[in-house]
Image (tube, helix red, strand yellow):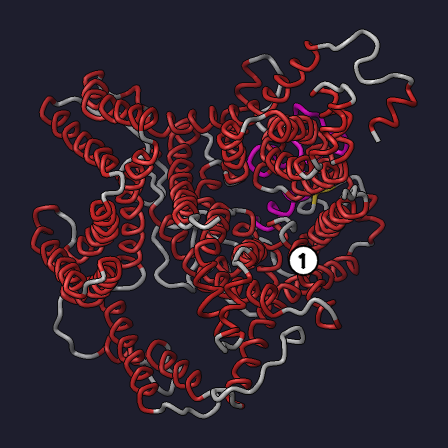
Amino acid sequence: MATERSTRDGSWYGDGEGVNQLRGQLFKWGCLGAMLFGIVMVFVLLAYVAIDAIRPLTADPGWHLTFFLTLVAPTSALLGYYGLRDRRSGLVGAIATALPAFCLLVGAGISLLLVDVFRPIEWFGTAVALVVAVGVVYVHRRLRTEPAAFERPIVTVGALVLAVVGVPGVVPSLSQLFRNAPIALNPATMLLYSFAVPVAILTGLAIARRRESRRDGLIAAALTVVGGVLAVIAAPAVGIDDYLLIVLSLSIAAPTAVYVEGVVRERDHLVGLALPIVAYVGTFLGAALVEAYGFAGPEAWLDWQFLTSAHSRFPQEAGIYPALVGSIMMMLVIVVSAFPVGVAAAVYLEEYAPDSGTVGRVVGLIEMNIANLAGVPSVVYGLLGLALFIRYADMNTGSVIVGGLTVGLLILPIVIISSQEAIRAVPNSMRQASYGMGATKWQTVRNVVLPESIPGILTGTILAFGRAIGETAPLLMIGAAAVVFSPPGSFAEKFSAMPRQIFAWSHEPSAEFRYGVLAAGVVTLLVVLLSMNAAAILIRNRYQRRS
Amino acid sequence: MSEEPARPAFAGENRTRSAKESAIKWFLFVCAALSVFVTLAIVATLLFDAIEFFTRVSPLAFFTGTNWSPKIGEAFGVLPLVTNTLAVTALSALVAIPVGTASAAYLSEYASDQVRSVLKPALEVLAGIPTVVYGLFALVYVTPALQAVGIPVGTFNLLSASIMVGVMIIPMVSSLSEDAMSAVPDSLRQGAYGLGATKFEVTTTVVVPAAVSGIFSSFILALSRAIGETMIVVVAAGMSPQLVPSPFGSIQPMTSAMVQLATSDLAGGTAAYYALFAIGLTLFVITFSMNVASNWVASRYREEYE
């Protein structure tokens, strides 16, 4: 086509004034410049927001010097070494450094739920009820080896429903019974049973599988429980409620220990472990020195007070806590609603859907429809939520569950599309092998396709959840509160989420709100978002071994 | 399961199992069909309430009226909102289309693998930032910066909001265009090189024309995103619709008007409440047909090679 036009013009490549190198160079650098324009602009704006939120210049020079010497200089030197000599070790080090910080965020999220939504007794009751339900299902499978049609699914679902929900008004659920039972346990003991023990079992299983030794698994599980008990003992010294310290310390320690154990055991780029040691020792040393010499830190807007208090008219006292809890609860609703439905839809479209015939045409329509739904403006989804959930289903205006369901519908197409891609990447030979051994379609899906594609599904889904946590327009449409002064106590209560709260602050005209509180809110939101994206990338890299 | 090969009945094969299999299949199908239900629900709710609105306000007054003040005076002319939406879209396209296309050309034709592995994720970051944050950037940093360099913009203005909308949709243009350019077979490039073309000529006279359907479809998709973009304009562009918008002054696009209606205490059943759905329907029809058009352009004008 290009040659046609050139001939028509009567010119040929390289005709006329000869080859002009300047033009090509200008074009190349122009393209690069245009590309950098957007990237640089956004990164500069992000830097501005971070500086406004933390205000590093308000700190003593001594504070900067101390942390530079104890933290920045050693870690930079180490990073330089990794970058030049040993990139794989650098990656191991980066994961080992980021993992505890990320787990701290997750643990803090669980703790917030324990403080505000599920009391420890409710958590304990549900956990025990679930154990009973699983036990019933297990015994049933053992006793009835030749079940009638749908006997097993009915028993499974029935046991779970009885355990957690019960029949409203007729039969109270098991977890309800346990909650009301006269159990004389304090919160810490309850969480030792219902949080430390499951974590211990998971850790033990992970270690036992990797080391192929039951004894090592048992030791790891026992160590985890001991860690939980130690947390209870250490709680008064740290100054955090003992039951929260169990959750925090175990959710940091268990995954980190499992990861480090893997690195040490396989002697896999052991040098990388120097990075977390240098970084964390540097941080604590710097903090101790700053304390000892009395250097004042920066007067950051983003501080402990901001994270733990509610909105206030006075910028110095304003905080994001209720909105933070609201966002976490909304995410919980989204995870429970959009994730299973999205994955199930993707499994149908990739594994079951026929290519031809009437059903095939319907499926083609569904796929096209999903692609188009992904492009519908979020504000329209807000209208849908308003009409569907509030007007027709008569749920509470602006409640957590309405927000979660609405935003869940919004990200459903993204979840479906990314799960489809992950499922498509499973090689067909694996399915054929499974069929060859006499497995049915569902057995193949359950035992081969899903386990193989779950890392890819998780990666795409976490990215979609990242989009969900920043969505504001649907929340405005369904009437989420601009400002709440306490976190929602249940899923049917009115709530505010982080982006909603940030939007409310944008109406405040004073400079302190505009450049201070607002910046701190934005940085909080971005940190949550960034760690979710980092988790997604980490999962992808870790399981990218085959392709 | 029509495409599955017929299997002989094994010992474990029984009626229970096939009943279970088909129950699972139907359950999964229902999950997939839920997306169709979502579309139907969107169309139905928007349509019913928009019809309700049009029984109170005539469609003629809605689509040709030049005054939008639903609270005071009950004037429901949607034209100013539409021109404001178009203004935001056009200005943001001025930012996103050149930058996005140039980025795509650089990534696809010039960048080494190492450079691409750094720049591509950096560009994706732009798409991951919540739009309310972009809105704040426009309000808190871009507008004062524009004022500092002597551009007479108000606190809320069209210009800074459009710049941010443009930056937000850059990754959409660049990633889809880059896919289209990378899909151009290398034999075409080699052929042009063989005829004595320079790299610049290969890019502009071979690769871009060959990928033009994909590039155009990315433009349409990005513009549809700009039309539906809400939080940036709500935060930074103000609340006063102008029939003829000025880039330096406050405006109000459709999305922003919807948010204003929804967040002011509306009594259900008033014309203002139903106006929400009438604008929503207008917006939905525009963006949905643009998405369909984008798919159509991509498949209709695709150059098939080999």
Asked if residue A28 lies in the magenta stretch, the reply is: no
- Residue A256 or residue A193, whichever sits in front: A256
Q: Nearer the viewer, residue A43 or A235?
A: A43
- What amino acid type is highlighted by mark number 1? Thr
Work out whether residue B75 can be spotted: no
Q: Tag 1's secondary structure?
A: loop
Residue A225, by quadrant, is: bottom left
Image: A447 above or below A265: below
Q: State yes or no: residue B250 in magenta.
A: yes
Can residue A231 be seen at all in this image of the molecule?
Answer: yes
The residue under the point 18% across, 29% down is A282
Circle 1 residues within 10 Å: few <14, some 14–19, many ≥20: few
Please, is residue A186 above or below residue B196 in the view? Answer: below
Foreground residue among B130 and A275: A275
Per the rendered image, the range of residues in magenta is: B234-263
Q: Which residue is mark 1?
A: B270
- For residue A221, side relative to residue A109 (left or right): left
Question: Where residue B103 sits: x, y (%)?
Answer: 62, 28
Left/right of residue A342 with respect to residue B177 in the rendered view: left
Residue in the image at 49% along x and 57% along y:
A403
